[in-house]
Amino acid sequence: MAEKITVNADGSINVPNNPIIPFIEGDGIGPDIWAATRKVLDAAVAKSFGGAKKIEWLEIYAGEKAKEKTGEWLPQATFDAIREYKVAIKGPLTTPIGEGIRSLNVTLRQVLDLYACVRPVRYYDGVVSPVKAPHLVDMVIYRENTEDVYAGIEWAAGTPEAKQVIDLCASLGKTIRPDSGIGIKPMSATGTKRLVKMAIQYAIDNNRPSVTLVHKGNIMKFTEGAFRTWGYEIAKEAFGDKVISEDEMWKNHGGKCPAGRVLIQDRIADAMFQQILLRPSEYSVLAMPNLNGDYMSDALAAQVGGLGIAPGANIGDGVAMFEATHGTAPKYAGLDKVNPGSLMLSGVMMLEHMGWQQAGAMIQKALGTTISKKTVTYDLARLMEGATELKCSAFADAIISNMA
Ligand code: NAP
């Protein structure tokens, strides 16, 4: 019998054998990549658990399909369903132009308070990469989703609001040119600590060796610098002896992390862009403010050649939404052509979040095998020598046939 996922007081989830999971198919290429993803997720769950577990999919609406059916881009029922069922998956959504909505994705994240944008980055054999040793990259980014210059507190140059802020700053002894646009960068202890806590918990649960706080605190002391300070504080407050700071490791343990503890370290953002290229094997889980996370996610995904297959999730307290990281690619809509890898690997993250690791691992392995056999969709085929180009649906079938 199909049942709901429920959340315990400590934030962990209970997943029944037949959980109801809402999905948003998405616009443009959404229906193609969702059909391919659903087929692969169902096959992996069936094979991994011998039929004992099965997802009951529940369609909910957002984007163009919602507008057609209900007259609204994001119906209230969609928010209600995600809150009620706790875990959801979505394809890409068109950003309506001139309708007063900044972005459907941003609205979903804000309304549901999905404060962590999580992006795992790893290499799949056979994918063409611009660097020499892409297999050394195996990192998971935790990007703060609700604060920083992304909070949307902005006024255009010449507006009365911009003038008011400029005047206020003048009264505080800070000079701003009168023809400036104004953006505000709020970063709180609350926002930082809940994000860093989630990243450390992930590292502990998944035997990851370290969490690196990536910030620009040498220049922006009371925002980015405070992110670093609050990050170390919550590590100590919430995890005690399960973690160790880099300082303490050098002072008391000769620079060696004691077994069983997660190392908490920090790096300045600009230096970190060099580190991910020069010493990628030294980094595992990364926690960072919104803007740094935006840049770092794309830079790391490019490093493994996989911008098109990079998965993502937006996670809050008790609610998680897994999604393709690319857009709706409207020119390919309905052609059964594009790569479903991003949504599929987001589905893998979802299975891991549900505690169904075997099924997730089966998909990752089969996807790796399929790519290394050079049976791939057009985007990877055009970069590989001697590849066989498959349609989106045929790529999903190939993955299923490569499942052990
Ligand atoms: P896009 O849809 O990501 O497409 C840009 C290009 O990326 C495509 O033309 C294609 O490259 C490649 N690409 C994207 N998805 C692919 C896939 N699954 N397989 C293979 N190649 C893929 O970006 P856009 O054209 O800037 O945006 C289109 C719409 O999507 C806009 O309305 C935008 O607001 C929205 N959007 C939504 C999300 C989201 O829902 N999360 C994210 C970003 C954008 P080639 O042309 O080289 O083949």
Image (cartoon, rainbow, N blue to C red):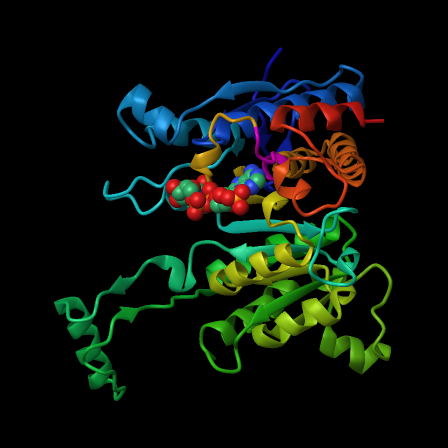
User: Could you say where residue 58 lies in the image, as x and y percent from the top left?
Assistant: 51, 19
- Comparing 149 with 10, the one in front is 149
Is 342 part of what is drawn in magenta?
A: yes
Left or right: 146, with 194 as reference point: left
- Comparing 196 with 357, the one in front is 357
Residue at the (49%, 31%) spot, across then down: 29
Left or right: 395, with 209 as reference point: left
Figure check: 182 above or below 351: below
Left or right: 110, with 161 as reference point: right
User: Could you say where residue 141 lies in the image, as x and y percent from the top left?
Assistant: 62, 56
Q: Quadrant of the C terminus?
A: top right
User: Could you say where residue 312 lies in the image, as x and y percent from the top left?
Assistant: 58, 45
Left or right: 214, with 191 as reference point: right
The reply to whether residue 113 is in sight is no
User: Could you say where residue 145 lies in the image, as x and y percent from the top left?
Assistant: 47, 54
| Magenta span | 337-343
